[in-house]
Image: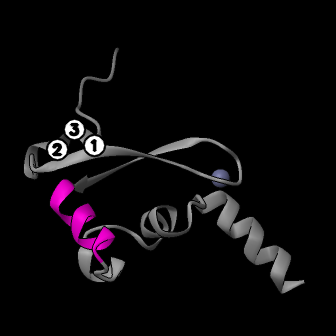
Amino acid sequence: MKELRPSIEEIEAGIDDLRERFDFLCDCCHQFFAVSIRGNDLRDWQNGKLAQYAFPYLTDDERELIISHTCETCFDDLADFWDE
Ligand SMILES: [Zn+2]
């Protein structure tokens, strides 16, 4: 049987259709990661608003990707590196 339930992304898109998907490149592993945010919030952040206020609905990992261009996996690797 094929899975017919909508993905989390599709459910969230239905709840908040103002959000758009933006692809952010990780400088570490050079992969793109999609994050759903509102264009207005991205503009606010680019104009100097703190990320935790501009994107309260994102996870820390998603904000880190936007702020420092580092994905969750690479960020964990870096944290391990600095811990040693
Ligand atoms: Zn990465």
CA neighbours of label 2 inside 10 A, class few (<14), some (14 to 19), many (20+): some
Q: Does 58 lie within the magenta span?
A: no
Q: Are marks 2 and 3 in contact (CB under 8 Å)?
A: yes
Q: CA distance from mark 3 to mark 1?
A: 4 Å
Q: Which residue is mark 3?
A: 10
Mark 3 lies on a secondary structure that is helix
* On screen, residue 62 above or below 5: below
* On screen, residue 26 above or below 82: above
Estimate the x, y position of residue 4 in percent, counting from the top left: 25, 23
In front here: 46 or 26?
A: 46
Q: Are marks 3 and 1 in contact (CB under 8 Å)?
A: yes
In the displayed structure image, the side of residue 17 where residue 30 appears, left or right: right
Q: Residue 52's quadrant in the figure?
A: bottom left
Q: CA distance from mark 1 to mark 2?
A: 6 Å
Q: Quadrant of the C terminus?
A: bottom right
- Magenta region: 39-47
Q: Residue 72's quadrant in the figure?
A: bottom right
Q: Are marks 1 and 2 in contact (CB under 8 Å)?
A: yes
Q: Amino acid at mark 2?
A: Ala
In the displayed structure image, the side of residue 65 where residue 3 appears, left or right: left
Estimate the x, y position of residue 38 in percent, counting from the top left: 19, 56
Estimate the x, y position of residue 47 in percent, counting from the top left: 28, 74
In front here: 84 or 30?
A: 30
Residue under the image location 26 percent in, 82 percent down: 53
Mark 1 lies on a secondary structure that is helix
| Mark number displayed over residue 36 | none
Q: Which residue is mark 1?
A: 9
